[in-house]
Image: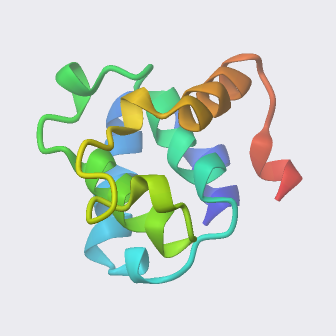
Amino acid sequence: MTCYLYNNVNTPEEAINAAHNFHSCRWVEQVVPNPYTFISFFYYKINLDETKYDDQGILDSLSITILPNAGVKQANLMENPNYSPLLDPTLLSTVDEWKSGKNLFDMI
């Protein structure tokens, strides 16, 4: 999946479409290795602009499902009801790494 994303998702619209596909195929029920790398890729592709590209909130939905499934307790809404991906310092720093030109999927 990560190779597909990196090689085929080039626009914000393609990123949101891929996120919807990931969610609708119920892949969110699986534990995603390196969840921050995975989730941050989508936010990077939309340049953190949820208002413009993610009117249905699919990236927030993926974040609050994938991160807790991988053991990230701060993203569990039962433990932290105020969690927001756009305020998560780990997610934001990983987006910055994508912006610097790194292919973080190579590191998985």
Q: Report how many numbered discs are placed on residues in the image.
A: 0
* Scheme by which the image is coloured: rainbow
Residue located 38% across and 29% down the image: 86
Q: Is residue 100 at least partly visible in the picture? A: yes
The front one of 90 and 30 is 90
Q: Is residue 11 at least partly visible in the picture? A: no
Residue located 42% across and 78% down the image: 27
The front one of 96 and 17 is 96
Q: Place residue 19 in its image quadrant.
A: bottom left
Image height of 102 relative to 1, above or below: above
The front one of 21 and 89 is 89
Q: Where is residue 23 shown, x and y percent of the image?
A: 31, 68
Q: Where is residue 92 shown, x and y percent of the image?
A: 55, 27
Q: Is residue 32 left or right of residue 69?
A: right
Q: Residue furthest right?
A: 107
Q: Place residue 50 in its image quadrant.
A: top left
Residue located 19% across and 44% down the image: 57
Residue located 78% across and 42% down the image: 104
Q: Is residue 89 left or right of residue 84?
A: right
Q: Which quarter of the figure is the N terminus placed in?
A: bottom right
Q: Where is residue 90 shown, x and y percent of the image?
A: 61, 36
Q: Where is residue 108 shown, x and y percent of the image?
A: 82, 59
